[in-house]
Image: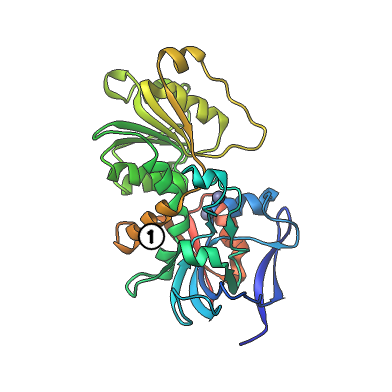
Amino acid sequence: MADMMKIAIWHGPEDVRIEERPIPEIDDDSVLIKTRVSLTCGTDVKTFHRGHPSVKPGGAFGHEVAGDIVKAGRNVKKFKVGDRIVPHNTAACGKCFYCKSGRNDGSCEDKARIGGGHGEYVVVPGRIVELNTFAIPEDVSYKAAALTEPFSCAVYGADMTRTSYNDTVVILGAGPIGLMIAMLMRMKGARVIHADFSATRLEVSRSLGIDLTLDLTGVDDPVKALRGLTPEGRGADATIDATGQPAAWEQCIDIVRKGGFVNLFGGCKPGTKITVDTRRMHYDGLTIAGFFHTTPRHVKMANDLINAGKIPVDAFVTGEFPFARLEDAIRAHSSQKGIKSAIIYE
Ligand SMILES: [Zn+2]
Ligand SMILES: [Zn+2]
């Protein structure tokens, strides 16, 4: 095996270079994969343009990968060299206060992580190998398998949204996660109203079978317009934010009916605040909840859905780029040309 590999390194805003680095060593519990596919993600777009707390200048980034095991530590029993696998990018520790109390999502205080997925080789740490890594069945592509990470977040967001059959759910935001959540809520039996400012993204939403979409471009009062689409105009049974915009968070709270459930799933910029009408919160008996990332249970659910062929992969992965054109792929994602792109490695 060669000693050096190519990997994408973030040097600063809009400065990503593909560089040669030594292929990392693994310990006895880890595996090394040769990457076959990595996917672009909204987090990559944020990292590319302005950086991310988890990426230091000179560091690697990217976290949605699938590939072949080329080295396995001696303690690894679940997999062997040659296996096609998809690792999730993190694994909760199972030991911290939050994991033990059942909140083993993004709240975990000691998550294991993979260190940079846009590279020819990626180390999967032992805890991820044990908890959140899956063999890829023969009839499932690397590209489909690599959707496990984003879908695991969407499955978590959708699963936590309390609804009954035929409930009306308003979802704000039709980016990759918003589209996935919309599809999953429909699978749960909800009547979904999906709103966004992008006509092309809403077209994808309709192709996924979403009942009703609303293009908010030029709409003066989105709350009024969206409430108007709910039964008797009483408001949605549940609302989900998948935009990470404070204004949309406030709209989610204003669009829900009395006793409704608000899932603020899109993460806003640090330091942002929203205003909540206390009358709505108290007298209208709202439940306002936040969820972040995913749990091992939801990672497994997402992987099962993919393997069962229940996810229309081509609706979510709309572009393909060779690794050398990673920057073009991220820019395409950023400018909303298509949904996500697959980076293909030789
Ligand atoms: Zn992602
Ligand atoms: Zn933990």
Q: Is residue 88 left or right of residue 182?
A: right
Picture coordinates of residue 310, whole percent (x, y): 30, 57
- Residue drawn at x 53%, y 76% is 75
Does any portion of residue 323 appear in the rendered image? yes
Task: Report if the beta carbon of the residue with label 1 is closer than 8 angstroms to ligand 1.
Answer: no
**Residue occupying image coordinates x 45% and y 54%:** 296
Can residue 65 be seen at all in this image of the molecule? Answer: no
Q: Residues within 10 Å of mark 1 (few under 14, many from 20)?
A: many
- Residue with the most extreme bottom position: 1
62 relative to 306 in the view: left or right: right
Of residues 343 and 127, the one drawn nearer to the viewer in this rendering: 127
Q: Residue at x 40, y 15 (%)?
A: 284
Quick check: 47 left or right of 66? right
Q: Position of residue 169 (x, y in %)?
A: 34, 33
Image: 337 above or below 251 = below
Can you say whether 206 is above or below 59 in the image?
above
Way the structure is coloured: rainbow
Q: Residue 103: percent from the left, percent from the top?
A: 49, 43
Q: Which corner quadrant of the image does residue 212 belong to?
A: top left
Of 271 and 41, the residue lying toward us: 271
Amino acid identity at mark 1: Asn
Say which residue label 1 marks. Answer: 303
The quarter holding residue 304 reads bottom left
Residue 197's spot in the image, x, y percent?
48, 37
Q: Secondary structure at mark 1?
A: helix
Q: Quadrant of the N terminus?
A: bottom right
